[in-house]
Image: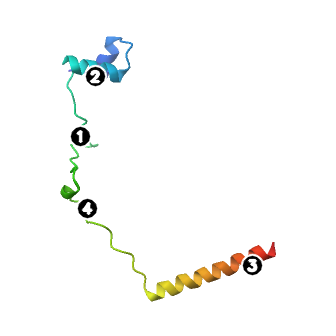
Amino acid sequence: MSSANKLYNASGTDLPFKEWLRREQLKGKLDVHNDTYLNMDGEDDEMPESPEENPYDDGPPPPVTYTRKDLITYSILGIVAGMLISKYIIKK
């Protein structure tokens, strides 16, 4: 069987492709595909629809924890950046 695109071009209709395709599917001349897409290998990518079935979901990410050293480092960097910005603004 020819592709839908070839049949559309051969029909010479003035309808847009989507409308023509729907009409032909309703007439029964073309198969109706229920939005099934193939990946690059030509295989179905069956992703589960509900979150309970998703094997890739590990749950929420763990909370971010900072150590005391990290907090001190970020505080010092913030103070130094503030001092540099204030000196730059005062010079202008």
Q: Secondary structure at mark 2?
A: helix
Q: Which residue is mark 2?
A: 22
Q: Which residue is mark 4?
A: 57
Instruction: Give the residue drawn at x 26%, y 39%.
Output: 37
Place residue 14 in its image quadrant: top left
Q: Amino acid at mark 2?
A: Arg
Q: Which residue is mark 1?
A: 42
Q: Residue furthest top?
A: 12
- Mark 3–mark 4 Cα distance, whole angstroms, equals 49 Å
| Quarter occupied by the N terminus | top left
What mark, if any, has residue 74 been given in the picture?
Answer: none
Establish if 87 lies above or below 17: below
Q: Secondary structure at mark 4?
A: loop
Instruction: Give the residue drawn at x 32%, y 13%.
Output: 10
Left or right of 56 in this view: 77: right
Q: Nearer the viewer, mark 1 or mark 3?
A: 3
- Mark 2–mark 3 Cα distance, whole angstroms, equals 69 Å
- Mark 1–mark 3 Cα distance, whole angstroms, equals 62 Å
Sooner in the amino-acid sequence: mark 2 or mark 3: 2
Q: Amino acid at mark 1?
A: Gly
> In the image, residue 73 lies at what x, y percent?
53, 85
Judging depth in this view, the residue of 60 and 21 nearest the camera is 60
Q: Which residue is mark 3?
A: 87
Q: Secondary structure at mark 3?
A: helix
| Quarter occupied by the C terminus | bottom right
Instruction: Give the residue drawn at x 21%, y 57%.
Output: 54
Q: Amino acid at mark 4?
A: Asp
> In the image, residue 80 lies at what x, y percent?
64, 82
Judging depth in this view, the residue of 17 and 23 nearest the camera is 23
- Mark 2–mark 4 Cα distance, whole angstroms, equals 37 Å
Q: Amino acid at mark 3?
A: Lys
